[in-house]
Image: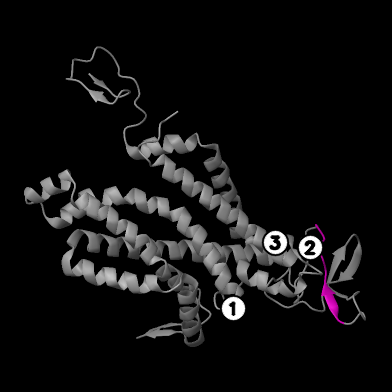
């Protein structure tokens, strides 16, 4: 009988009854059992689901609740508050009283978080901005992981000239500071757009920030993937498969890919958190998401001039970024611990 609790194998004996549960029939089932019992992971997933659902409901909120167009200027508009019609852009009470100040938070269905300098509903724009920020972060994460996996597997498994060429390309990308590379690519591509044969990508397309962010982080994921593949290539079961004459493509599909999948899964929430921060930074600098689209970074930029009068305009997207990144980091740590074979099941 095999004593799994002690990790010592003894010669098999005929079983006299049902064996006790050993915690799951596969590493994925085992990881799922650990995650289900991790309260911090449950809280993080719940928070992410709330943010994602709220962002997806942006059109419903804007049309049915706020009853406003968050992308159209409303400088001369009025809103009903406590039975009174109030101007969205109110006369300034500071200094000489010149100019106007957007209405502050009403904590009601109309202009819940107030208005920005164009008289647009901040709450509605916050939800629309969340849709774009999450879409860019998720899409760029997928692109980054696919490219990193392809480069890391080819470099680590085939070695030789292939490894040398791919490693030097990664070194060149790694030599640039991340934000300097992202800013440089954004300025060039957003100012000119991209035309590849019949395919034309305009400067205001979300595909540009998705592609830029997806590329700049490839070296940071490809390096660990390459190291894992090199370790697997020299392992006994892969050497045995090569000695038996099994085709390389079959070794890649059956032995290499399943063993690096856990590494890529751990990178998913961590890269999404990093990509949200990067996208917000680029959009804040006006080289990310372009008008008329909105993201959390562009909303912070809109509220930069209202920090002393209407700070909620910049604070709301900032809080949304903090909560989302915090939840993703906590989830990433929990997933890493769950996929660690040394973690014990409680």
> Is any atom of residue 105 visible in this view?
yes
Kindly identify which numbered label has been placed on residue 316. 3
Q: Position of residue 328 (x, y in %)?
A: 52, 52
Vertical relation: 37 (above or below) 320? above
Estimate how packed mark 3 is, as few (under 14), some (14 to 19) or many (20 or more) residues with alpha carbons within 10 Å: some
Would you identify the image quadrant in which residue 100 lies? bottom right
Q: Position of residue 74 (x, y in %)?
A: 77, 76
The quadrant in which the C terminus is found is top left
Do we see residue 52 in this rendering?
Answer: no
Answer whether labels 3 and 2 touch (C-beta < 8 Å): no
Identity of the residue drawn at 58% across and 78% down:
290
The quarter of the picture where the N terminus appears is: top left
The residue lying furthest to the top in this view is: 16
- Mark pair 3, 2: CA separation: 16 Å
Query: What is the number of the mark on residue 110?
Result: 2
Secondary structure under the numbered disc 2 in the rendered image: loop
Q: Position of residue 200 (x, y in %)?
A: 42, 83
Display coloring: one colour
Q: Nearer the viewer, residue 309 or 113?
A: 309
Which residue range is magenta in the image? 99-107
Give the x, y percent position of residue 324. 58, 55
Q: Secondary structure at mark 1?
A: loop
Q: Is residue 103 magenta?
A: yes
Residue position marked by numbered label 1 in the rendering: 286
Tag in front: 1 or 2: 1
């Amino acid at each position: 009988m095999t004593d799994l609790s002690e990790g010592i194998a003894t010669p098999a004996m005929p079983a006299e009854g049902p064996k006790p549960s050993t915690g799951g029939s596969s590493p994925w089932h085992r990881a799922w059992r650990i995650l289900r019992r991790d309260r911090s992971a449950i809280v993080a997933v719940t928070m992410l689901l709330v943010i994602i659902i709220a962002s997806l409901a942006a059109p419903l909120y804007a049309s049915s609740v706020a009853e406003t167009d968050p992308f159209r200027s409303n400088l001369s508009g009025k809103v009903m508050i406590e039975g009174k019609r109030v101007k969205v852009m109110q006369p300034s009470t500071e200094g000489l009283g010149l100019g106007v100040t957007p209405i502050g938070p009403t904590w009601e269905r109309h202009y819940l978080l107030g208005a920005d300098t164009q008289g647009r509903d901040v709450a509605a724009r916050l939800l629309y901005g969340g849709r774009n920020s999450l879409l860019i972060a998720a899409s760029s994460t997928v692109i980054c992981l696919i490219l990193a996996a392809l480069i890391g597997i080819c470099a680590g498994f085939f070695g030789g000239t292939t490894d040398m060429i791919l490693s030097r390309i990664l070194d060149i990308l790694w030599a640039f500071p991340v934000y300097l590379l992202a800013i440089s690519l954004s300025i060039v591509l957003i100012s000119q757009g991209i035309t590849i044969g019949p395919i034309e990508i305009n400067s205001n397309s979300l595909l540009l920030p998705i592609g830029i962010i997806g590329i700049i982080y490839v070296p940071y994921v490809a390096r660990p993937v390459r190291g894992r593949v090199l370790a697997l290539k020299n392992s006994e079961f892969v050497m045995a498969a090569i000695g038996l004459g099994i085709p390389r493509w079959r070794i890649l599909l059956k032995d290499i890919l399943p063993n690096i999948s856990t590494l890529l899964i751990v990178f998913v929430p961590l890269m999404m958190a990093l990509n949200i921060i990067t996208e917000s930074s680029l959009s804040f600098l006006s080289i990310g998401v372009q008008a008329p689209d909105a993201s959390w970074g562009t909303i912070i930029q809109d509220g930069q001039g209202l920090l002393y009068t209407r700070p909620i305009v910049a604070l709301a997207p900032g809080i949304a970024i903090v909560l989302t990144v915090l939840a993703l980091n906590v989830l990433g740590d929990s997933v890493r611990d769950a996929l660690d074979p040394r973690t014990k099941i409680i």
